[in-house]
Image (cartoon, rainbow, N blue to C red):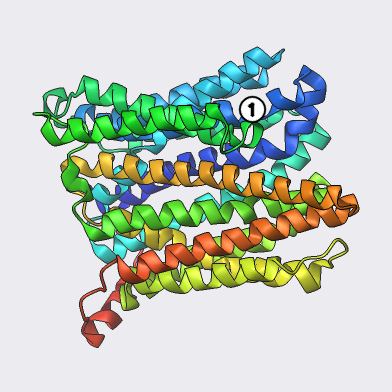
Amino acid sequence: MSYVRSSRWTALAVLSATGLMTILDGSIVTVAMPAIQQDLGFSAAGLSWIVNAYLIPFGGLLLLAGRLGDLIGRRTMFLTGNVVFTAASLLAGAATGPGMLIAARLLQGVGSALASAVVLGILVTLFTDPVERGKAIAIFSFTGAAGASIGQVLGGLLTDALSWPWIFFINVPIGAVTIALALRGLPGDRGIGLSGGADVAGAVLVTAGLMLGIYTVVQVEEHGWLSGRTLGLGAVSLVLLAAFVARQATAATPLMPLRILGSRNVAGANLAQMLTLSGMFAFQVLVALYMQRVLGYGALETGLAMLPAALLIGSISLFASARLSARFGARAVLMTGLALLVTAMLLLTRVTPDAGYVTHLLPPMVLIAGGGLVLPALAALGMSGARESDAGLASGLFNTTQQVGMAIGVAVLSTMAASRTGELLAAGAGEPAALTGGYRLAFAIAAGLLTAAFAVALFVLRRPAPRDPAAAAGDGRLAEVTS
C-alpha cells in the first residue's frame, strides 16, 4: 500500500488519537466511580459492572474485529468503531440509572474493540521501514501513556469541578475530530473479501469463548477461584476456545490462520505481554488504591502523584525506545525494561501504612519508566511476523492478549490482596496495616509475573541478527527524520 510520507504521519496522529481516547476512558472512569454510585444508586456489587461491562465486549471482540478488518477493510472497521464508541459515550454521560449506564458501557466496549483491533494493523502497513515503524510504534505507545496520565488527573478534575457525566462527554469531541480526520487521512483498503476467511462457526466459538472467559475471570473476586461457578464457566470457556483452535486447523477459510502463531517472536511477544499486563495492574490500580485507602490521598492528589511515572513512560517510549531497538534489537530493549519493572515492584513490597512519597513511592515511580521500553518493544515483536493480509488479525490478537492479561491481573492481584487483608484483620491488625499487607503481597506476585515475562523474553524470543555498526549509526540518523 503506497502512501505519501506526510499523509502517513497524519494517519498516525489519527490512530494515536483513538488509542488516547480508549486508554483515557479506561483510566478516567475509576476515580469517578464513588460519585457515580452515589448519584445513580449502584449497589456495591453492581458498581464493578461499570468496568466489567466495558471490558468483556472489548476483550471478547478484538480477535474477531481484527480479522474482519482484514476481510472488509481496516479503515471501514476503524471508522465504524469510532462512531459506535462516540455515540455510546454520549449515551453514558446522559445515563439516568444503572441499567442505562451499563448498556452504554457495553456499547463503548464494542466500539473500542472494532477500532482498537485494527490500529496496529493499519500502522504496520503504513510504515514498512523498520526504523520508521519503530518510531511510529513509540509515538503510539506514548499517547497510551499520556492517556493513562491525563485520565487519572482529568477524572478527578472533571468529577470535582463539574460532575461525573463529563468523564464520558469528553470523548464526544475527541471522537468527532478523530472521525473527521480519519475520513480524510486514512488510506482506503478493500480488504481481501469475506471469502478469504468468513468462518462463521469459528467467529461464534472464539467470541463466545473469550467473552465467557473474561467474564469468569473478572467475577473471581466475588465468587472465588475454586467455586463451582468459576470452575464450571472456566471449563466451558476453555472448551469453546479449544474447539475454535481445532476448527481453525481444518477450516477451508479459517478466521485465524494458525500460521500467525508460527513465529516464535509473535507467539512469545503475546505471552510476554499477557504476563506483563497482569503484573502491571499492580501499579496501574493497586498503587492508586493504596495511596487513597491507606495514605489518605484524594483522587486528584493520586493522579498527580502518579504523573511522574506516566510522563517518564511516555518520554522514554517517544524519545528513546525506537533508537535503542534500532541499535540493540527489540528483545534486548524488552528485557531491560522488564528488569526495571521487576525492581519497581520489589521496592513496592516495602511500603508501610505511613509511607512517605519521596522515600517509598517516588523510586518505584521512576523505575516504572521501564514500561516505556517494554510496551513499544512488545508491539514491534507482536506484529513482526504479520503479512499485510493478516495485519488486522495480528493486531487483534495482540490487543486480545493485552486485555486478557489485564483481566487476569484484576482477578489474581485483587483477590490475593483482599484475602491477605482479611487474614490480617482476623489476626487483629488495624485496617491500614491490613490493607498495606494485602497490597504488599499483590506487589510481590506482580514481581513474579514480570519475572516470568522476562524468562519468556530470554528463552522464547529470538535474538536479533548481528548488525553492522555503521548501519546502526545510519539507523540513528534515520530516526531523526520526521515529516
The relative height of residue 102 versus residue 161 in the rendered view (above or below) is above
The kind of residue on which mark 1 rests is: Ile
Q: 57 or 476, which is in the foreground? A: 57
Q: Is residue 308 left or right of residue 260?
A: right
Q: 235 or 377, which is in the foreground? A: 235
Taking the spot 40% from the left edge, 33% from the top edge, the residue there is 115
Determine the secondary structure under disc 1. helix
Quarter of the image holding residue 353?
Answer: bottom right
Quarter of the image holding residue 63?
Answer: top left
Locate residue 351, reporting x and y percent.
Answer: 77, 66
The relative height of residue 403 versus residue 330 in the rendered view (above or below) is above
**Quarter of the C terminus within the rendering:** bottom left
Q: Which residue is mark 1?
A: 50
Q: Residues within 10 Å of mark 1 (few under 14, many from 20)?
A: many
Locate residue 281, reporting x and y percent.
Answer: 59, 51
Q: Is residue 470 left or right of residue 172?
A: left
Taking the spot 53% from the left edge, 31% from the top edge, the residue there is 230
Taking the spot 76% from the left edge, 41% from the top edge, the residue there is 156
**Quarter of the N terminus within the rendering:** top left
Locate residue 389, reporting x and y percent.
Answer: 16, 41
Taking the spot 85% from the left edge, 57% from the top edge, the residue there is 433
Residue 296 visible in the displayed image:
no
Q: Is residue 405 left or right of residue 5?
A: right
